[in-house]
Amino acid sequence: MRFIFKIAAIAAMLAGTAGVAHADTIRCPLDQARRTITDPLPGGWWTTPMVNRLTETKVRNIGGKPALLCIYGASGSVQREAPAGQVCRAVSGGFNCQAAGGGGPRTAATGGLDIPQTYMFDLDRGGVTQAGADFWFQAETASLLYLVPRNGARIGVGNRSNRGAAGCAAARFTTDRVSLRDIPVGSYVCVKTNEGRISQFRVNGISGGSPKTLSIGFTTWQ
């Protein structure tokens, strides 16, 4: 069977936004999408279209470029390239985009943190704290150490290079915990904080002995 996504007016709406260079907000083109079978059916047979509302927005790296995805559950998704020269982050119903370079992205917090094992830390404002924590420095044993996303934060290890705001906005994120063995000293790691901001930290060091202290440098963007 051939399936298609019947998403009315997508072509017109995407064409209307494709050339926008300085947009602050890009909304998804539809509140809901319809998926159906279009093959001719014998008499007495019919199909029930599948209709889903917008369920999620994401910024993904597709073909080496950041792309904006509007996802409609089982009905599929539509996408477009991020505006040239802008850094975008997913928000409810669409995307917030800011000019890269001199005018942005703006920094929300930056600095260094020394995190004792078993403690939590926040990257929206920067601090070793339980209040609004993005991560827990978990010590399962003396040698099995993890960073565990908390309160809806997500982590994107990727290739551990310095990707900056634009690269991290297009990273693949997960809520799975990450072993410190997978992010040795010198690794750069992307984060989407529990408040929806894009952040990046560098693993600057981890102390010897036990208990351990993890040292990072971070920047979180608005």
Image (cartoon, grey):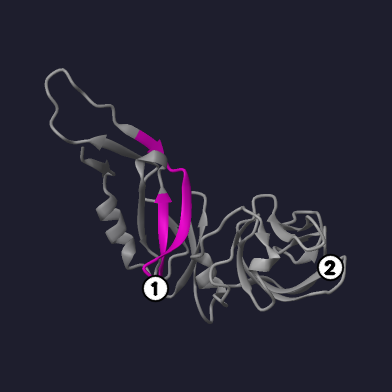
Kind of residue indicated by mark 1: Ala
In the picture as drawn, the residue positioned furthest to the top comes out as 44
Element type at marker 2? loop
Read off the magenta span: 51-70
User: What is the quadrant of the N terminus in the image?
Assistant: top left
Residue 84, disc: 1
Kind of residue indicated by mark 2: Lys
Q: Residue at x 75, y 67 (%)?
A: 126
Q: Is residue 89 left or right of residue 52?
A: right
Q: Position of residue 187 (x, y in %)?
A: 64, 75
Q: Residue at x 47, y 52 (%)?
A: 57
Q: Position of residue 103 (x, y in %)?
A: 53, 78
Q: Residue at x 39, y 68 (%)?
A: 83
Q: Is residue 124 visible?
A: yes
Crowd rating for badge 2 (residues with CA inside 10 Å; few <14, some 14–19, many 20+): some
Question: Disc 2 designates what residue?
Answer: 212
Confirm whether the magenta stretch covers residue 131: no
